[in-house]
Each structure stands twice: as structure tokens, then as C-alpha cells.
Image (cartoon, grey):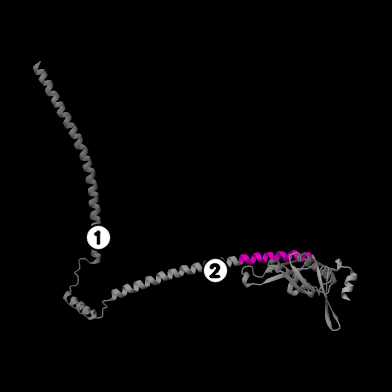
Amino acid sequence: MDSSGNAYGVLQEYERKIKALSENERKLSKEHSIIERESALLKKDITDLTTEEARQTNDLVWLGYKNLLDEMDIGAAIKELTDEYEGVKSRINLRADEAYVQVIEGYRGMSTRRNQLESERNSIVSFIEEIVKEKEKVFMEAFQRVDGDIRNTFEKMTGGAAWLEIENPVDIFSSGVMLLVRFPGKTVPRESTALSGGEKTIAATVFLLALQSLKPSPFYLLDEVDAHLDAQNTERLSKVLLERSRDNQIIMVTLKDSTVSKAGLIYGVYPKEGLSQVVKYKNPAQVPLAQISENKA
């Protein structure tokens, strides 16, 4: 039994050693594989480096690195450079750095001033543009008001059409303004300068009244504006003036009965014994004819 037990113990001991050796063998085998891979990589690197070395060597050979360089005495070159330096040293401005600083400061000052002037210029240009826009706005508002008044008044007076047009709408302050008129029965509008005498009178009167509506005056003074009008247009003009007299005082010289008949206050002028006589009376429609005759007498 004792010898049997000893043999079993020895057997187990050998098995442990065999197991340990097997484990070491596996580790060594794994390390060997790793070393083999690293060796292969190193061989590849060596091959690549050898190839690169050969390529660079060829480049150096082509550049002539094996050829001897020219030899020269640098002492002579140094002496030449020294003599040149001594020759120009007396002409060197030792205060050039100070002058440089002054120039730089002057440049910076001028640059700053230039930027300020540019900013001021931009502000002025912007201000001018705003003024121009405001001027255009005010002009167009006034233009539209006058144009609207011309359209309404001319239609009341004649039953036709009249309106204003700007010759060059792109540059309104460098172009003119046209008054176009189309009287009843006419198909083509004409400019006011191409109208007949009576037609011009109507167009001009309408235009002046429209301008006055833009900035009304306390009173209007008209001198025989109805002289070249026929009876129908005289009647229409007198009605328009009567309507305007509600807000303004109108003084008018006329020889037309239809105009006189709508006046609120009439001054008559007539000659007598070489002198001008003046009579004053209210609307004839409100005063008996006998009284008017008596005043004239």
C-alpha cells in the first residue's frame, strides 16, 4: 500500500509538471507567432527603407553630391565685403529709425483723418439722399394734388378731361411737366401750348386754380380771364369761381353778364365828362333794377 501510494503521488507530480510545461509551450507558441508577425513587418520596413535609400542616393548622384565643390579663399571675400561696408558706412543715416517713426506716425494720422473724412462724406451723402427722397415725396404729393384738382375742375367746366404728366418720370427734377387737355368731342389729347385762344384760357385758369388750391391765397385777382370764352364756358367758369369764393375772396375784372350775375359785390366803372365814375352795388339779383338805374344816374 505504501509503495502504491508513493507511485500515485509521483504520478500526480509528473502530471502537474506536464500541465505546466504545456501551458508554457502555449505561451511560447503565442509569443513566437507575435514575434514572427513583427519580424515580417520589420522586414517590410527594411525593404521600404532600402528602396527609399536607393532612390534618394540616385537623386543625390544626379545632383552631383560626389563631385568636389569649388574651393575659394574666403579671406579675400571677407576683405572685399569689409571694404565695401567701410565705404558706405559714412553715407548711412543713423537717424533713419527716428525718421521712420515720424513717417509712420504721420501716415497713421493721415489714415485716421482719411477714415474720418470718408465717414463724414458717407454721412453727407446719406443725408443728401434722404433730402432728395423727401423732396421727391413732397413734390409728388403736391403734383398729385394739383393733378387731381385739374381733373375735377376741368371736368366741371367743360365735361372734358385734363391732367398733368411728367416728361421724364425717372428724373423728375430735370424734366418738365406737361398739361394735357382733351375737350369734349375731341379724341386725341393736346398739350396746352397747342390749344386755341379760348381753350388756352380755360386750361390756364384751371391750372392756376389748381395751384392755388395747393397753397390757398386770401384772395384771387383775375383780369378778364373770360374775355375769349363763349357764353357756355363763361357760365361754367363763373360757377367754378363762385364755388371757390366760399373759401377765398375773388376779385375779377369782367365784361360778361353771366359772370357779373354771380358776384356778391359789384363795382361798375364808366366814363362821364372825361372822368371815370365808379358805382358800387350788391348782386343785381338782390337789388331792384330801379335802384340800380338810380345809382347809375
Q: Nearer the viewer, mark 2 or mark 1?
A: 2
Q: Residue sitting at 23 percent across and 57 percent down?
A: 53
Image quadrant where residue 208 sits:
bottom right
User: Image check: 157 left or right of 145?
Assistant: right
Image quadrant where residue 81 sits:
bottom left
- Residue 265 lies, with reference to residue 277, above or below; the image says above
Instruction: Work out whether mark 2 precedes mark 1 in sequence or the reverse, and give the earlier one.
Output: 1
Q: Which segment is the magenta one?
A: 136-157
Dot 1 amino acid type: Gln
Within-10-Å neighbours for mark 1: few <14, some 14–19, many 20+ = few
Q: Residue sitting at 22 percent across and 43 percent down?
A: 36
Quarter of the figure that contains the N terminus: top left
Q: Which mark is residue 188?
A: none
Image quadrant where residue 94 sits:
bottom left
Quarter of the figure that contains the C terminus: bottom right
Give the residue at the far right of this rendering.
Answer: 290
Dot 2 amino acid type: Ile
- Residue 123 lies, with reference to residue 32, above or below; the image says below
Give the residue at the far left of this rendering.
Answer: 3
Q: Residue sitting at 13 percent across and 21 percent down?
A: 8
- Relative image position of residue 143 (x, y in whole percent): 67, 66
Q: Which residue is mark 1?
A: 56
User: Image check: 126 left or right of 221?
Assistant: left
Secondary structure beneath label 2: helix
Is 37 or 133 nearer to us in this picture? 133
Q: Which residue is mark 2?
A: 128
Give the residue at the far bottom of this rendering.
Answer: 274
Is 223 or 195 nearer to us in this picture? 223
- Is 192 inside the magenta-drawn segment? no
